[in-house]
């Protein structure tokens, strides 16, 4: 049906949301729009109170307006309560004959017997219900059920934010010392690049204290407060539009809660009441925000606790717009941000507003933030220096993301060196046009050079750089940048854009790899002492089929008619691989039975990331179509060194003999079974390891697009004969130091033109 397509358009939902003056008008517009699309005389939204196990009618089109807030149903009561209790749609051509039907006199629904209700869910959490009703002669069909379910899944996140704000109605009754000038700090490169700009410090732990840096001696009025609110809303909407323009993953909804908070009468009303009672507007904003931040932070629900983060960001914007006296275009544009930790939503927001660079002082920042920063082309250095959080705003910072260096208030000579490096980088960027469609060694051996893709914005770069395909698409990124699990249809839309962006080239989809250093803020799960060794990746997916199956179906649907590979991460046992493959094949059979276009014969492979796989690699090679060595995890699990822990960084050694021998065994067995094996971790783009990989027989490398020109040039200077000699010498060594010396000596000789 045509309305199914219209209902699933996220742009329309954004318009409904952005154009609403309050959460109540937003819900009212939803029911009006849905009633029109569904050709229904009645549409209603009910929200669920988990503590009371009760549904309340919050908005309706077609029933008596007086019924809003008055109609209440217990979980399991009436058709609406039944649908939410059993987490399924209920469709009745004559509602009143169903024994669960509950009659409410005076709400004017007697004439609308055809009844359809679907639950609104976030994962398995109950949010509410969406209902439509028609006259008896126009019953709802299967397509109507599909349409309403699709819309409910699209609305779940925004409606949950609305529910959160509508239920929280309670009313609330010196510059630190800086770092010495000229200080040079060395950290870990997470995303390469150069930046020189004034700093903005974002320390969530002492957020409210930042207001002390403002000039609060001026007398502000209630009108000033309202102007600041309007300015803040304009900024947030502008940031949302920028995200919509730059990224195709529908990540702009990360601002949904910001906009809802700006329209919430409880939140803004409390601030206004304090001002009218005599509080200065900055103090009124701070006191009210602190009340809600504390309330969110103490909530048992992890999703609600995360809203404290959104409110902190929003309050900072509001205070700055109030005290600055004029609307700022952006908090981050042309600035270097220093933060204790970052969420994916932080990074996306800052990148959309033109941040120059990022410095993270440790803590919660993890590897997926580095991946996003690379995709967004934002320099990022992680440095163990909490005292940087004490820097006053507008301190000049030089960020060398190529070498992991941070200069505080740099001297003129350092700035001159920086400018020279920047000119060299621009020369390198201009050199990208020299990329060849086929990568060969100096002695003519073909090497498949593929691209890793994190965000869809990587795809045009990979295409322009003549990547031979996508060797690793990290499908968890659309999950990480959202505040709820994407639906099957939402994933199809994202994956299809990926496929369309690189036509006629192979694409390897890695199924969802969450856990460890990739945490979903909206996933309610108990904390783990060691998440890297915990409930993650394929373990999570096989346990949560309600997440795994929609993703598999989405990949199959999006890759119809193209050359696609699907691989499973963090495989430990043959049983795990076979179970995951059975799930995939069951999805293929189901889609065929439903006559849904799909890829009926993808190649099915696995990541090699856990040492347990090595001893069983011969058995795996008889079952898997291909392998991809994820060196980052493989190294940390082999050497028991957490790659995100700076305290053990010196133990994370890619050239450890056990690591190199294990990879060699995997490659040798895979080639004996005629199975391709690629390398897709960070080692794949580090030039010192390229001769070793070619020497042991690796003929496919997958790297972030940024590294494609560099890797192709390095391969072009190598010969396979010399690489094989180096590999034999390396594998004969038993100490890390000896291997390091060999790589250092031979790399220069192997990369010199004319050597063999």
Image (cartoon, grey):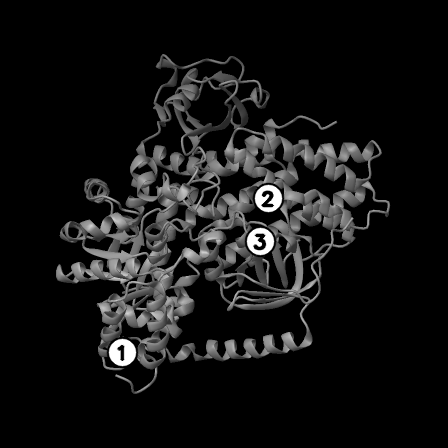
The answer to whether residue 562 is seen in the rendering is no
Q: Give coordinates of residue 102: x percent, y percent.
A: 44, 13
Mark 1 residue element: loop
Q: Which residue is mark 3?
A: 361
Q: Give coordinates of residue 250: x percent, y percent.
A: 46, 50
Q: Could you tell whether 373 is left or right of 700 in the image?
A: right
Q: Which residue is mark 2?
A: 19
Q: Is residue 159 above or below residue 554?
A: above
Q: CA distance from mark 2 to mark 3?
A: 39 Å
**Which marked residue is nearer to the observer: mark 1 or mark 3?**
3
Residue at the (46%, 13%) spot, across then down: 103
Res 441 label = 1
Q: Quadrant of the C terminus?
A: bottom left
Q: CA distance from mark 2 to mark 1?
A: 57 Å
Based on the displayed image, in which of its 4 quarters is residue 731 positioned? bottom left
Of 616 and 377, the residue lying toward us: 616
Circle 1 crowding by C-alpha within 10 Å: few under 14, some 14–19, many from 20: some
Q: Give coordinates of residue 628: x percent, y percent.
A: 27, 57
Q: Is residue 636 above or below residue 484?
A: below
């Amino acid at each position: 049906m045509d309305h199914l397509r219209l209902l699933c358009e996220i742009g329309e939902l954004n318009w409904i949301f952005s154009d609403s003056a309050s959460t109540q008008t937003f819900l009212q517009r939803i029911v009006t729009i849905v009633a029109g699309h569904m050709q229904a005389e009645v549409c209603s939204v009910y929200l669920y109170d988990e503590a009371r196990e009760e549904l309340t009618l919050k908005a309706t089109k077609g029933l008596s307006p007086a019924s809003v807030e008055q109609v209440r149903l217990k979980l399991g009561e009436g058709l609406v309560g039944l649908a939410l209790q059993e987490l399924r749609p209920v469709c009745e051509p004559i509602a009143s004959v169903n024994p669960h039907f509950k009659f409410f006199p005076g709400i004017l629904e007697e004439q609308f017997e055809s009844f359809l209700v679907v639950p609104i869910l976030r994962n398995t959490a109950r949010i509410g219900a969406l209902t439509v009703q028609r006259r008896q002669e126009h019953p709802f069909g299967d397509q109507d059920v599909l349409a309403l379910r699709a819309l409910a899944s699209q609305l779940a996140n925004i409606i949950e934010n609305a529910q959160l704000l509508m239920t929280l109605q309670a009313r609330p009754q010196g510059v630190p010392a800086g770092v010495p000038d000229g200080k040079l700090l060395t950290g870990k490169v997470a995303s390469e690049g150069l930046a020189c700009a004034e700093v903005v410090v974002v320390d969530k732990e002492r957020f409210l204290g930042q207001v002390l840096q403002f000039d609060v001696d001026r007398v502000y009025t209630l009108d000033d407060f309202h102007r600041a609110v309007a300015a803040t809303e304009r900024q947030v909407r502008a940031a949302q539009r920028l995200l919509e323009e730059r990224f195709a993953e529908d990540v702009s909804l990360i601002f949904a809660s910001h906009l809802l908070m700006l329209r919430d009468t409880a939140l803004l009303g409390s601030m206004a009441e304090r001002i009218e009672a005599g509080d200065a507007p900055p103090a009124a904003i701070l006191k009210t925000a602190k009340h809600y931040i504390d309330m969110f932070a103490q909530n048992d629900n992890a999703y609600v606790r995360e809203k404290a983060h959104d409110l902190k960001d929003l309050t900072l914007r509001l205070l700055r717009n109030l005290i600055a006296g004029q609307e700022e275009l952006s908090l981050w544009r042309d600035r270097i941000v220093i933060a204790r930790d970052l969420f994916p939503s932080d990074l996306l927001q800052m990148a959309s507003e033109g941040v120059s660079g990022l410095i993270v002082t440790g803590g919660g920042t993890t590897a997926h933030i580095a991946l996003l920063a690379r995709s967004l082309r934002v320099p990022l250095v992680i440095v163990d220096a909490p005292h940087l959080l004490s820097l006053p705003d507008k301190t000049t910072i030089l960020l060398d993301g190529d070498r992991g260096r941070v200069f505080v208030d740099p001297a003129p000579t350092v700035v001159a060196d920086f400018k020279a490096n920047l000119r060299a980088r621009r020369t390198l960027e201009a050199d990208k046009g020299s990329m060849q469609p086929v990568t060969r060694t100096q002695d003519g051996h073909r090497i498949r050079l593929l691209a890793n893709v994190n965000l869809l914005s990587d795809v045009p770069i990979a295409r322009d750089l003549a990547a031979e395909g996508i060797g690793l698409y990290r499908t968890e990124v659309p999950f990480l940048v959202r505040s709820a699990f994407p639906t099957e249809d939402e994933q199809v839309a994202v994956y299809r854009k990926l496929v369309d962006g690189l036509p006629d080239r192979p694409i390897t989809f890695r199924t969802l790899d969450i856990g460890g250093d990739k945490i979903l803020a909206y996933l309610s799960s108990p904390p783990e002492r060691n998440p890297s060794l915990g409930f993650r990746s394929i373990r999570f997916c096989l346990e949560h089929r309600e997440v795994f199956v929609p993703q598999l179906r989405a990949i199959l649907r999006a890759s119809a008619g193209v050359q696609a590979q699907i691989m499973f991460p963090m495989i430990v046992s043959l049983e795990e691989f076979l179970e995951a493959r059975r799930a995939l094949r069951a999805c293929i059979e189901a889609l065929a039975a439903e006559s849904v276009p799909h890829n009926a014969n993808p190649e099915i492979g696995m990541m090699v990331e856990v040492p347990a796989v090595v001893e069983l690699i011969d058995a795996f090679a008889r079952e898997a179509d291909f392998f991809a060595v994820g060196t980052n995890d493989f190294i940390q699990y082999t050497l028991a060194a957490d790659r995100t822990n700076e305290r053990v960084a010196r133990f994370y050694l890619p050239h450890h003999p056990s690591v190199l021998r294990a990879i060699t065994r995997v490659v040798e067995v895979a080639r004996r079974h005629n199975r391709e094996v690629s390398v897709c971790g960070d080692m794949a783009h580090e030039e010192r390891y390229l001769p070793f990989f070619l020497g042991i027989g690796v003929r496919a490398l997958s790297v972030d697009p940024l590294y494609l020109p560099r890797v192709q040039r390095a391969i072009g200077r190598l010969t396979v004969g010399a690489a094989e000699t180096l590999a034999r010498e390396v594998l004969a060594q038993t100490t890390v130091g000896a291997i390091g010396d060999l790589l250092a000596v031979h790399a220069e000789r192997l990369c010199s033109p004319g050597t063999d």
